Amino acid sequence: MNRAVLSALLSHWRRAPLQLLTLVLGLALATGLWTGVQAINTEARSSYDAAAATLGEGAYDQLVPEDGGSIAQETYVALRRAGWQVSPVVEGRLAGQRLVGIDPLTAPGALAPVQVDGADIAAFLGAGEIFGRPEVLEALPETGARLVPDPGAAPGTALTDIGLAQRLLDRDGQIDRLVVAPGQPLGRPPLAEVAPALVLRPAQDGSDIGRLTDSFHLNLTAFGLLAFAVGIFIVHGAVGLSFEQRRPMLRTLRALGVPLRRLLALMGAELLGLALVAGILGVGLGWLMAALLLPNVAATLRGLYGAEVAGTLALRPGWLLSGLAVALIGTALASASAFARLARMPLLSGGQPRAWAMGAAGGRTVQTLAALALLGAAGALALWGKGLIAGFACLAALLLGGALALPLLLGLVLGAGERAAKGPLAQWFWADSRQQLPGLSLALMALLLAMAANVGVSTMVSSFRLTFTAFLDQRLAAELYVQAADPAQAERIEAIAAPATREILPLASVDRELEGAPGQVQMARDAQTYRDNWQFLRAVPGVWDRLAAGQGLLVNEQLFRRADLDLGDALEVAPGRALPVIGVYGDYGNPSGEAILGEEAFRRLYPDALPLRFGLRLPPDQVPALRAALEEAGVPQAAMTDQAALKAFSLGVFERTFSVTAALNVLTLGVAGFAILMSLLTLAAMRLPQLAPVWALGLTRARLGRLELIRAVLLAALTALAALPLGLALAWILLAVVNVEAFGWRLPMTLFPWDYARLGLLALLAALLAAAWPAWRLARTPPAALLKVFAGER
Amino acid sequence: MLLTVRDLKKTYPGAEGPAPVLRGVDLDLAAGESLALTGESGSGKSTLLHLVGGLDRPDGGQIALDGEELSVLDDAGRARLRRGTVGVIFQQFNLIPSLDVAANIAFQARLAGRHDAARDAQLAEALGLAPHLAKYPEQLSGGQQQRVAIARTLSAAPRLVLADEPTGNLDEATAAHVLEAMLALVTGSGAALLMVTHSQALAARLDRRLHLTGGRLA
């Protein structure tokens, strides 16, 4: 019996291949977008984990200098002698790669690439070995050490013995931090006694980099979910339609003796098979998408957060299985209501198929209440919600509420059109459009979500771009930036540049904890350039004078918000030294807290942190001459960056940041367009009984086809209009709620009417293209098919 | 006795209160026998057929089919009965639109687990369907579709054939031909036939004739 029933059920798809395509492709696209995002996230996270495992970040307590400098060899020896089980780490950049030196004899087990009791320890310590990914090793210069490829190593990182690393980095006797092994001996003297200049940074649950990039991944996950939701709308429609079209067949099957439970089980098995096929297709699509986008994501994370992510994709069972699971869960969600209807379907009720999803009045009331409740919840969360999760919950409630409200809104507009219509044809057109609404509502909701996401994200990105460009103009005002190799060269640079420049801006900084989190203290000379170009979010009067006089400091917005500071509040910038906050500046693209001191104050507090970098102000046409003079004095070209190149690099980093979201935007809009096409095609067959009487009354088939086209464009235009305020609300939540929670800064929101107009035109074009084929098919419907309606043979 | 119906009652809810359709029907049908059921529109002929076929449940009375009491059967039991013992020929054909004629004919026999390809070929020949086996229902005329429905039922070789106006969509000559073939095939297999019809001429060709009026058989 099972084979016979299954063959009957499956035969439906042979006769309705388009519907099968809708179902499989909708689910595959939804799964693909979700899986692609998951693949990117998993790949990036695994890179952080590899980095954390190599560098000991997060897993172990660490001792770091309180003033942000380096640790002397003697301090390390003193700690070891006092019984502290610590292991030294030094790191720096060699030929663009991160070189990390560790001591395998004292390092906690998981950190070292070789085992102490193994035969290879001698090679590691003796002639010297450098471990790393093949591409990293390839980039290193000739060092004399043996290169050992290790695909499991952290991306962009080479690992070697600390002695060799100190030699290669030219940092003999210097240590950056000490990893504290778990299980320290009891009775050892306190840290303050042995090494008072060091502080203990406790182990963290996740790596520093991991937490910094969480916001970016959350953003991606939200987009993945949104795209998945759009796909599920399509699957829901396709499953509902297939059940509705097969209703007479299902009734016949039951009349012929197929038990209801068996029928439900077999239909479940059928859907399971289709979901698996679509899921596998989707996972493949997702993999392809991730492989295409991953290099950009890697560049984004490297540029934005300094995190190293492998630029190639590995096939990981985690996201593969999660993709399949999501396909199955999505199918179950999308088909639950269809199964419930089938289970309740009486065996002998009226035989004619009804148009699917023709909502009853009761359903509309529930939908209205749900839409209002969700929009209310979104408002409440926006006003009173706290944290990133609340921000995203607010987004979800807003989008879902907006989607549910759409058919009701369109119904009202079409009803008004009907009342205002003059001629009978116009009246029929509006009334008929309203009748089509339930059948098209799922596709229109998908379009609304896709367009709102587009408006929201493009507003956010464009606002960011505008603010960021202004910020770059402000922060990169100097025409030429020069990096000195050592203090002696720095002095020579100042001497050579002085006659050619109108201002020299020395740049110095130290890394130190600010309000309990890693941050940086920078130095700013009292210069006209800063006074002319810097804009403050908030500042006291005479801020530059007070900064130059050492009467206060400037903080970036993220530190200001995170530490809940106010103007006048004191901030500790050196051990035992606090200064009042006198200004707050926007600092986009930087996740850390930052404080700026006047030159005098900085030099007094950090006499060892000499400026090795300089911003030089001079007429742009004199830049090449100065570069040549500096090069003659031994400054390599690579150490000089002109402003245009630096800006281009910074903007490039920013553009890549959002290229992933832009790609997802386009894909989502494409999926929505596909939903409209499939809905129109599948509804076309059910339209004949509605259109045949109008045809019989004197309208040509071609005219009916044109009216169908106009109807689709009208509905898409109304949806686009509804998507605009929804998208702007989405942008506001992204900029004012999510962005503040995720990145620590709030961006001014700017409107871009031309972008929205272009997007609206794209949506109309998508609707026009989607409606063209069904309309063409209608215009070519044979009169015999229309006559069948009257013959009662349908 | 193959079919025994005693004091069968059925009421439907109506706009002006409950509307009794069957008010106590008694009926016997032996194997190999054919019985015509006539009556006005709305007299309850189709309802009686649906109750006997296990498609619906009565409000009172008993139906025993081949010694098995239908009222004690659950949904699965009644589905088994429809699959194996009863064959229903519907007025609206109820063919499966996505299966071709050959697959439609074989379908119920496959469900019942007694498919016989030779028998299908014989049925197709007898009912004039042999040239149409590869076609789909929508490509057939109403009369051809009805013959497919008849062939589907007879292919499963049920003990009792229930036919609801099986020739209602056919012209007089075709109807006579189809009925002839159906009678020969049903009675030739030892099954019983209970047929609902409006046509007195067709009813006259069956072994017995009963008229349903006012919810009772006359």
Image: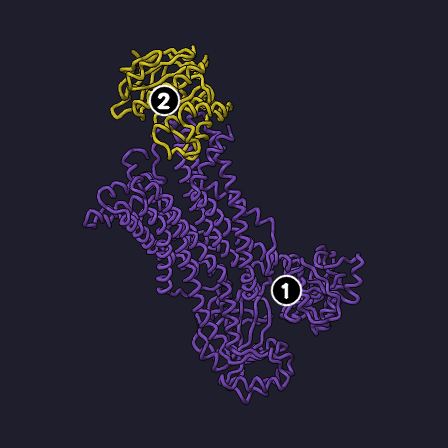
Mark 2: which amino acid? Val
- Disc tally is 2
How far is mark 2 from mark 1, CA to CA? 83 Å
Relative to A395, say whether A535 is above or below: below
Can you tell which of label 2 and label 1 is closer to the viewer?
Answer: 2
Chain letter, disc 2 residue: B
Q: Colour of chain A?
A: purple
Chain letter, disc 1 residue: A
Along the line of sight, the residue nearer the viewer: B197 or A419: B197
Along the line of sight, the residue nearer the viewer: A417 or A191: A417
- Residue ID for mark 1: A156
Q: Which mark is residue B178?
A: 2
Residue A97 x %, y % = 64, 68
Examine the image and state in which quarter residue A89 appears.
bottom right
Residues behind callouts 2 and 1 on a single chain: no
> Does residue B115 appear anywhere in the picture?
no
Residue B187 x %, y % = 42, 15
Residue A200 x %, y % = 65, 62
Residue A461 x %, y % = 44, 63
* Residue at (37, 59) in percent of width and height: A762
Mark 1: which amino acid? Gly
Relative to A158, say whether B216 is above or below: above
> Are discs 2 and 1 less than 8 Å apart at CB?
no
Q: Colour of chain B?
A: yellow
> Does residue B211 appear anywhere in the picture?
yes
Number of other residues with Cα within 10 Å of mark 1, as a class: few under 14, some 14 to 19, many 20 or more: many
* Residue at (52, 75) in percent of width and height: A645
